[in-house]
Amino acid sequence: MPPPRLDRQFERHLAGLVNAREPGVLTGGLKGVEREALRVTPEGRIAQTPHPPVLGSALTHPYITTDYSEALIELVTPPFTAAWELQQYLCDIHQFVYRHIGEELLWVTSMPCAIGGDADIPIATYGRSNIGRMKHVYRIGLGLRYGRAMQAISGIHYNYSFPERFWPVLHEVREARLRGQEFIDDGYFALLRNYRRLGWLILYLFGVSPAVCRSFFSGREVPADLEPHGAATLYAPHATSLRMSDLGYRNRSQAGVHVSVNSLDAYVRDLDRLVSTPHPEYQALGVRDGDEWRQLNANLLQIENEYYSFIRPKRVAHSGERPTAALRRGGVQYVEMRSLDVSAFDPVGVNQHKLCFLEAFAALCVLRASPPLTEEDSARYEANHLRVARHGREPGLRLWHDGRELPLADWAAELLDQMQGICELLDADAPARPYAVALERQRAKLLDPTLLPSSRLQAEMLGQGVAFRELALGMSRLQRDYFRDLYPPNEQRIAELADQAAESHEAQRAIEAADKLDFSEFVARWFAGRLA
């Protein structure tokens, strides 16, 4: 292959950071995690019990909520500057949950347990307030549009913002004309574009969903390229992340949807267009049947969050404020990376090495050259993600980049080499060098693909001769026992979570008591931006 093209902008930017008089220019960024997990019975079926009240209100608890299903719990951390603190919080919150779900388990893989059909997947409820009802109706619409099975898939979302001192240094290095929040927005959108170009690397290194229970396709045609393993399991021999393939979140229903990441204005414009453009198929479903709501609207997207992107620009919204309105108001505050599968090999679904690597990868995406993407280029790069998700471990796999094809292994090695200097900056004076260690862990996977978590999971399943759901159920039991036996528990944190659970119920009651609008009027005002 031709030699890799030098990214002189990256080299200049990295040298500028290394030579800056600002110590620890990259250290101290804020990071948080959202971990989703199905609650399942001891036999490995989706729990039909409601979200346990003792865990708090799913509507208002800041750290324990639900995603699509009443059984799909979502555990959220506050932001931390150190990955080990984040990991400790996740551990504490898991212990708290396991104290209050009886004999139920948290399913430890992204692809769901055995499913008996859509009726097996209870849609999450959030009380009788208008905002709670809106969240419920939105989920009814998702089920009608994409099927509930897809909504039962779980993942890990990694939230990250650069330290404040990083931006002035980068501004000086770049000799940029933009200033203040405009410059920060420009930097984050450079990250988004390069994540679209390079994010396949996350699927390759950390994907851990090569197999699925055959029941996932109940009532649907099984793709021809999936191989059977026994009567109950299907797998793709070279897959890294079926969750992020066209079998999961990157479903064909949104195949033609394009959202530009060339600027904040373009991004908001495209999302607004999708939320306001009617779709004939969804119009045929109907929005309401008398007083029964089937979806929030019949547009391409009901709301902005329906767009299943690998990464999102985010800003904390005010009460009643739409995500795009929050971005318009204050610009990008952080990014949400959404490509991580839940790892059955890690008790909390993720580990410190992954968190450190993602932080360094975010810096790589900001520092590399990131010219605007055409719609055609975006489609080609997104196709790389799908190819890696479905065929990433295929020997000699090649990916499209800037008009040519590169071997995945060579491109990945180039990117990891560029991350070396970034990891040295992030390690600063840390004697344990956690970022360098995390990088070396990934280099080892390039040299020996059997170390890839997707390869490890597949090897365990085939080696033990068990179905995917049996393997996942056994690992779920092991992790339940891990948290139950973990000693000493952080009783102070557990007490705080109990207090927050009680406060969240009070907060939900206050919201419900304050509601004065008819639900139809509430929805109309929300879309018109007249609630915030």
Image (cartoon, rainbow, N blue to C red):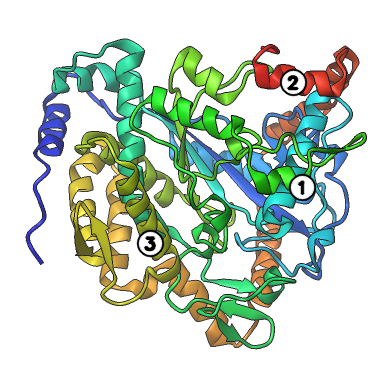
Secondary structure found at label 3: helix
In depth, the one of 148 and 412 nearer the eye is 148
Is mark 1 in CB contact (under 8 Å) with mark 2? no
* Residue under label 1: 285
Which residue occupies 34% across, 72% down?
449
Which residue occupies 83% across, 58% down?
47
Q: Is residue 289 above or below residue 438?
A: above
> Which badge, 1 or 2, is on the more N-terminal residue?
1
Left or right: residue 6 versus residue 417 is: left
Spatial separation of the CA atoms under disc 1 and disc 2: 20 Å
Which of the numbered marks, if any, corresponds to residue 204? 3
Q: Position of residue 118 (x, y in %)?
A: 79, 60
Is mark 3 in CB contact (under 8 Å) with mark 2? no
Which residue occupies 56% across, 22% down?
316
Left or right: residue 31 versus residue 428 is: right
Question: Which amino acid lies under the numbered mark 1 shown in the image of this protein?
Answer: Leu
* Residue under label 2: 524
Question: Which amino acid lies under the numbered mark 2 shown in the image of this protein?
Answer: Ala
Q: Looking at the rendering, in which quadrant would you find the C terminus?
A: top right
Q: Position of residue 439 (x, y in %)?
A: 29, 53
Spatial separation of the CA atoms under disc 3 and disc 1: 37 Å
Secondary structure found at label 1: helix
Is mark 3 in CB contact (under 8 Å) with mark 1? no
Q: Position of residue 238 (x, y in %)?
A: 42, 75
In depth, the one of 494 and 466 nearer the eye is 466
> Which badge, 3 or 1, is on the more N-terminal residue?
3
Left or right: residue 371 versus residue 222 is: left
